[in-house]
Image (cartoon, grey):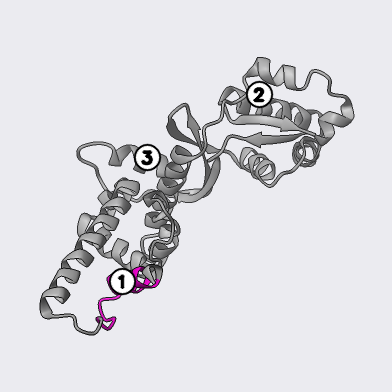
Amino acid sequence: MLASQQTAFMARVLDEDAQLPAGWSARHAAGLAVYRNNYRTALVEAMRATYERTARWVGEEAFARAAAHHLILHPPSGWTLDVIGDGFAATLADLFAHDPEVPELAALEWAMHCAFTAADVVPLDGAGFAAATAGFSDEHWQAMRIALVPGTALVPARHNLVALWQALASETFEAPDYALAEPTVLLVWREGLDPVFRPLDAADAIALAAVLRGASFGDLCAELVERFGEAAGIERAGALLGQWIGDGLVAGVSC
């Protein structure tokens, strides 16, 4: 009984055109309207906290409208406010079809948010990786799979999001054309408590995408060998692995 009443009440909060319960007076309706407004305002503010730079880029009024539009199409269903911004970049791609940097910026902010809220893991350092692979045979190295720290993500972009991100962190910012001549990919992960990102070149992006898909180290080496030749490909694979360990990206390895 209580659960059905709660479900019906929430449906009326989400839909202002929903029929009110029998016996409700104008005072009840006004109270529900106040509650609905407070609820929506709280959700939009939570969205703004996640997408702070996106809001600054498009303007507060435009952002509020876009956030409300997204929340109407995708009402929250999780137990935490952390997840209400999921899919906002896709909504913005429709709303800002002539400003493609907007959904890209939002996608980066969402990836940063997810990295920040991801589970805590102590990454392997050089010594830890050496200990974890000390008994590996050639077959083990070929079959080895690399687990990246939770929240690691790749964000494709056709705009210079690094420059835009830095500009939006300042008190005043200009709005030049941030379009890139060639598309790029940004790597997002967490260093300690801080989400960070950096651009990748094409080969690095392909390699990390393969790792995120669960490819083995042998498969990764084969892909780089095909791209760069045997000696250069093997060297590139080792260098990338060393960089990932140095960046704190590697949570563990398995065969």
* Residue 132 visible in image: yes
Q: Give the residue type at disc 2.
A: Gly
Q: Give the residue type at disc 1.
A: Phe
The residue depicted at 36 percent of the width and 60 percent of the height is 99
Q: How many marks?
A: 3
Q: Can you give x and y, in whole percent of width and height, for residue 147 in the image?
A: 66, 36
Q: Quadrant of residue 4?
A: bottom left
Q: Can you give x and y, in whole percent of width and height, for residue 23 in the image?
A: 19, 83
Q: Which residue is identified by label 3?
A: 163
Identify the residue at the far left of this view: 27
The residue depicted at 45 percent of the width and 48 percent of the height is 180
Report the magenta residues as a range. 4-20
* Quadrant holding the C terminus: top right
How far is the residue under mark 3 from the one under mark 2? 27 Å
Secondary structure type for disc 2? helix
Q: Can you give x and y, in whole percent of width and height, for residue 178 in the image?
A: 37, 48
Does residue 58 appear left or right of residue 1 in this picture? left
Which one is earlier in the sequence, the residue at label 2 or at label 1? 1
184 or 120: nearer the viewer: 120
Q: Which mark is residue 9?
A: 1
Front tag of 3 and 2: 2
Does residue 181 appear left or right of residue 235 in this picture? left
For label 2, the crowd category at 10 Å Cα-Cα, with few meaning under 14, some 14 to 19 and many 20 or more, is some
Secondary structure type for disc 3? helix
Which one is earlier in the sequence, the residue at label 3 or at label 2? 3
The secondary structure making up most of the magenta span is helix
Q: Which mark is residue 242?
A: 2
Indicate whether residue 15 is drawn in magenta: yes
Q: Are marks 3 and 1 in contact (CB under 8 Å)?
A: no
* Quadrant holding the N terminus: bottom left
How far is the residue under mark 3 from the one under mark 1? 46 Å
